[in-house]
Amino acid sequence: MPVDLHAHSRVSDGSDAPEKLVDLAVAAGLSALALTDHDTLEGLPAARARAEACGLRLIPGTEISCGGGLHLIVLFLEPGPGPLQDRLAWIRDGREDRNRAILDRLATIGIDIDEDELAEEAGGGVTGRPHIAARLVAHGHAESITDAFDRYLGAGRIGYLPRRTLEAADATALARASGAVPIVAHPHTLDPDLGPRLDARLQVLADAGLVGIEVHYPGYDADTRARVRRLADRHGLLASGGSDYHGTYKPHLQLGVGDGGLEVPDDVLEALAEHAR
Ligand code: AMP
Ligand code: FE
Ligand code: FE
Ligand code: ZN
């Protein structure tokens, strides 16, 4: 049975409750699901309870954006204090000031979104630009989430501000120090050519303790998977993957199957688990 090791619920920038993801995973015939909300493990208790009831294997995880298109999936990360867990709390704290500053900037061009409606949009979880984008759409300032980023929220637009980030090698080392398993997500976002730039980056991260890379991702054809797999082999990395499901925030992606052609074999999970402690 396939697995899905990359998915977001509404405790970050997905639209579904964590329990709903478990239900979707069961319906899709998956044997395991990793919940990888951005910067938080808040959805874990609810997802775990439902997974136990359904007999689905639930892997605790998170996704960390490290800049330059490098996103790190961290699996087998447990809630509570810890080297990486404490840094995630620091990142989350920084988001509150940033969100307020973004709303202030939008107000200067006559767009009024208040903090309460933003909090409601986010459903109490980690709040970020996708939620602001959804309000921009709701107010008729953009046609879609992507359009809202293009017009207002992307780098260089009026509503863009940087946020607290962790450098990738630091995040990788902190993940290992927390007993968790760091994996480079969707490598095309840090190098569309999957070329020397990616290769050099992987060398640095492998030295810092990187365990895996996403070989399986929506839109990756057999040729792309083969190229990422060769890089993985060269750096001694395991071949992970997942749908990057976000519910209505990325409506073209379904849990388990992504854009339809995704299938993540389950054998990687045991190999990944061996690196957790
Ligand atoms: P934040 O962490 O608040 O900076 O928001 C980053 C999130 O916004 C990412 O996880 C993406 O899912 C989403 N995002 C970034 N750029 C775009 C875009 N051009 N279109 C749609 N979603 C985007
Ligand atoms: Fe996201
Ligand atoms: Fe990502
Ligand atoms: Zn993701």
Image (tube, helix red, strand yellow):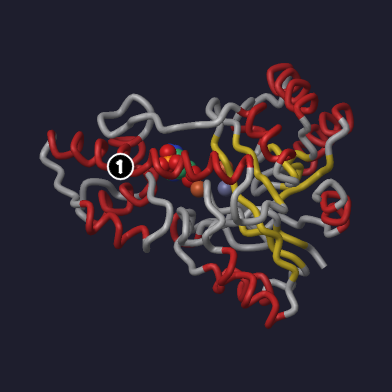
Ligand 3 picture quarter: top right
Q: Position of residue 227 (x, y in %)?
A: 80, 32
Three-letter code, disc 1: Asn
Q: Is mark 1 within 8 Å of ligand 1?
A: no
Say whether residue 85 is left or right of residue 126: right
Location of residue 9 in the rendering, given as x and y in whole percent from the top left corner: 52, 61
The answer to whether 271 is drawn above or below residue 29 in the figure is above
Residue 32 lies left or right of residue 61; in this view the side is: right
- Residue 187 spot, x, y in % from top left: 67, 34
Q: Residue at x 76, y 57 (%)?
A: 263
- The image shows residue 50, relative to residue 116, as above or below, that is below
Q: Find residue 25 and report its horizontal and vertical position in percent.
A: 66, 70
Image quadrant in which you'd find residue 52: bottom right
Q: Quadrant of residue 138?
A: bottom left
Question: Going 80% across and 38% down the picture, which residue do you hit?
Answer: 211
What's the residue at 63%, 29% (across, down)?
A: 168
Residue carrying label 1: 99
Q: State the SS at label 1.
A: helix
Q: Relative to the observer, which residue lies in front, 173 or 74? A: 173
